Image (tube, grey):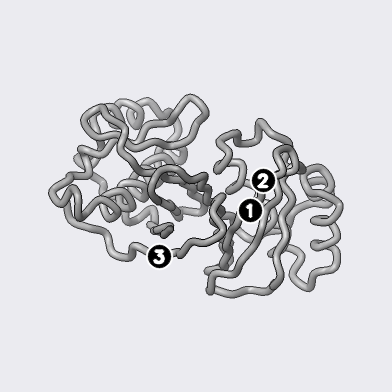
Amino acid sequence: MIIYWCSRLLQDVPVSGDWLHPSEKLVADGFKFPKKRNDWLLGRWTAKNAVKSFLQKSFPHLDYSQIEIRAAEDGAPEVFFENKRLPVFISLSHSQGIGFCTITQPGFALGCDLEKIEPRSEYFVNDYFTKNEQALCSKSNYPELIANLIWSAKESTLKAIRTGLRVDPRLMEVSFEKEGRTDHWQPLKVLAKNSGQTFFGHWRVVNDIVYTVVANEPQYKLEQFKNPLTS
């Protein structure tokens, strides 16, 4: 199994809306606040880059505007072409003007997230982290990194199980072996205590942003889509 990923910046998003599907243009026009609109556009642009790259061989002439990213009833992003759902699974995150998307074949649970490394209050840690996770934060030489890494891994897992924060984050317990800032992907695990299921993940840090990816498959490779494709 290969999980592909790509990252895009807000300044990468084309000013013209020609790359949007007609239904997406309606959504974009409905935002009242520029920041929310820009974040949404960044997410859609990042996702479409991932989808177009992933489907390049089977759909070589696929245009960005033909790709439709819909939000399912549970909020998870789904990919459509000509009103038919495509056989791909994506997860999407954006923060600090950065978009992050992972994509793979269907049949797997997949989630991704990115978080800015910043202070997390004691109340936040006590409210959302398990006792073991609280201990990881208190004993670490990098408490801000560890707190945001744990939170990001929880967010990724909640996306993978398609519940979001409707489930208590303390039911997701994160563990990992190494700590410290590294731009190399490092392994982690997340135990979903409500189901007993284990999710297998990776994390890395780039420019004070922690990235996490999780899946319900223990053996997979992470590969990056780098350059945007032309339409």
Q: Which residue is mark 2?
A: 197
Q: Position of residue 31 (x, y in %)?
A: 41, 29
Q: Amino acid at mark 3?
A: Glu
Position of residue 72 relative to residue 105, above or below, is above
Q: Amino acid at mark 2?
A: Gln
**In the picture provided, is 194 more to the left or to the right than 182?**
right
The span from disc 3 to disc 1 (Cα, nearest Å) is: 19 Å
Position of residue 149 relative to residue 25, above or below, is below
Position of residue 95 relative to residue 202, above or below, is above
Task: Please tell me whether mark 1 sits on a helix, a strand or a loop.
Answer: helix
Q: Position of residue 206 (x, y in %)?
A: 53, 68
Of discs 3 and 2, which sits in the foreground? 2
Q: Reading the chain from its start, which is encountered first: label 3 or label 1? A: 1
- The crowd level at tag 3 (other Cα within 10 Å; few <14, some 14-19, many 20+) is few
Q: Reading the chain from its start, which is encountered first: label 3 or label 2? A: 2
Q: Position of residue 158 (x, y in %)?
A: 61, 41
Of discs 3 and 1, which sits in the foreground? 3
Task: Please tell me whether mark 2 sits on a helix, a strand or a loop.
Answer: strand
Examine the image and state in which quarter residue 90 appears. top left
Q: Which residue is mark 3?
A: 223
Relative to the observer, which residue lies in front, 58 or 112?
A: 58
Image point 46% across, 64% down: which residue? Answer: 221
Q: Which residue is mark 1?
A: 153
- The crowd level at tag 1 (other Cα within 10 Å; few <14, some 14-19, many 20+) is many
Task: Please tell me whether mark 3 sits on a helix, a strand or a loop.
Answer: strand
Image point 18% across, 48% down: which residue? Answer: 59
Relative to the observer, which residue lies in front, 43 or 155?
A: 155
Q: Position of residue 41 (x, y in %)?
A: 36, 42
